[in-house]
Amino acid sequence: MIKKVPQSAHQLIDQFGRTVDYIRLSITDRCDFRCVYCMAEEMTFLPRHEVLSLEECARLVKIFVSLGVSKVRITGGEPLVRKNALWLFEEIGKLKNLNELVLTTNGSQLEYQANNLRNAGVKRINISLDSLDAKRFKKITRTGNLDKVLRGIDAAKNVGFENIKLNTVLMRGVNDDEALTLVKFAIDQSIDISFIEEMPLGEISHDRESTFFSNQETLKLLQNEYPLIASAETTGGPARYWRVANTSTKIGFISPHSHNFCEHCNRVRITCKGELFLCLGQEDKIDLMPLLRDNPHHDQPVIEAILASMAIKPKGHDFDLHRAKPAVIRFMSHTGG
Ligand code: SAM
Ligand code: SF4
């Protein structure tokens, strides 16, 4: 039975007492890469009218911020391939009650956009990087160019984001031998790095069970090489952090296969279609697009739907690699990482 959810005008609190103050908004399902763990080789993308306009994205973020959300992550697909994406960053950057505007990107456009993004108010940035070997990088991303991404990382460093973090998905037999090299790169660049365990989202071309490389294994590898100090830092998500002694680098381990972080979950996700997903690994959602489009001048119906959604935020997710089918049929690029 669903309990009655206590609400106040400025807070999103779910049925388990968790406060939601962080949204991740995917502004496009399109991408210039086709990473093997994220997309199929041939993808069909949404027609334009089924995707929230940038104005609708800005309106939604404003509504969430009015309900107490203080952190917004823009993601995708690849957010920086969306035309005029900068306008949205600038609009969100102006919101008074927002503490943090952050971005997840594959880095392909950063050499041109880093400066504008920083000026728009983007504080921190996550850049995906799965290999430092140009050929292998190409194989994993299918279409990506390593040099371009490395130039993007340089540009991001030069414009002075408060924090830059690499996101790496290690896959057994594909790039698991690069854990140490990637950490060394992060240390040399004075940036952070997080290892994300591959999640069963969407039908792709490889068997995820065979490539699964656990964060426990990665941690063991790294501990043989570096003095790591466990850190109590948390962002309310699945990441656990370690500091590399005598460096400025922090290593995160994002382990969605262990459930122990769900009790502190503080986030919801909005797809580029305006679906509000209450959990990355579950299907519970409400569709905000029709409410936005039917009520172009009245936010109240949208606000009420968001408040009501707190009653269906699940207790936790349930990823199981041994299942024949993916846990969730939608791709990460649809929900937004
Ligand atoms: N295109 C941007 C990027 O690659 O950073 C943002 C979107 S991408 C979906 C966000 C993050 O999700 C990336 O760091 C990517 O490595 C990760 N990701 C995508 N599919 C995944 C999967 N099946 N399991 C784990 N991580 C995944
Ligand atoms: Fe594109 Fe990011 Fe997915 Fe790679 S992980 S295909 S860069 S959306």
Image (cartoon, rainbow, N blue to C red):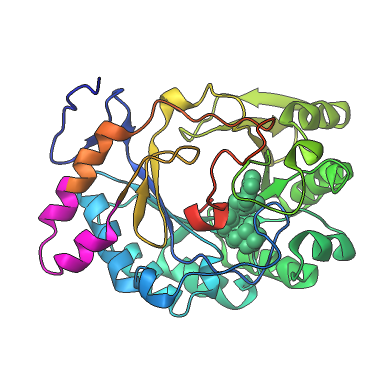
Tell me where residue 299 appears, x and y as whole percent: 14, 59
Which quarter of the figure has residue 12?
top left
The answer to whether residue 306 is left or right of residue 271 is left
Q: Residue at 41%, 62% (x, y): give it.
A: 272
Q: Residue at 50%, 57% (x, y): give it.
A: 334
Q: Which secondary structure dominates the residues rendered in magenta?
A: helix
Q: Nearer the viewer, residue 64 or 331?
A: 331
The answer to whether residue 229 is left or right of residue 44 is right
Q: Residue at 66%, 49% (x, y): give it.
A: 167
Q: Is residue 309 above or below residue 90?
A: above
Can residue 105 be seen here?
no
Which quarter of the figure has residue 268?
top left
Q: Is residue 137 above or below residue 235?
A: below
Image quadrant of ligand 2?
Answer: bottom right
Q: Quadrant of the N terminus?
A: top left
Q: Nearer the viewer, residue 69 or 143?
A: 143
Q: Residue at 17%, 41% (x, y): give it.
A: 10
Q: Is residue 150 above or below residue 271?
A: below
Q: Nearer the viewer, residue 92 or 1?
A: 1
Question: Is residue 294 highlighted in magenta?
Answer: yes
Tell me where residue 39 appears, x and y as whole percent: 65, 58
Can residue 204 be seen here?
yes
All told, the count of numbered labels is 0
Residue farthest to the front, as pictured: 324
The answer to whether residue 106 is left or right of residue 274 is right
Which quarter of the figure has residue 5?
top left
Tell me where residue 209 appears, x and y as whole percent: 75, 36
Question: Is residue 6 highlighted in magenta?
Answer: no
Q: Which residues are magenta?
A: 287-304
Q: Is residue 333 above or below residue 220?
A: below
Tell me where residue 276 appears, x and y as whole percent: 34, 49
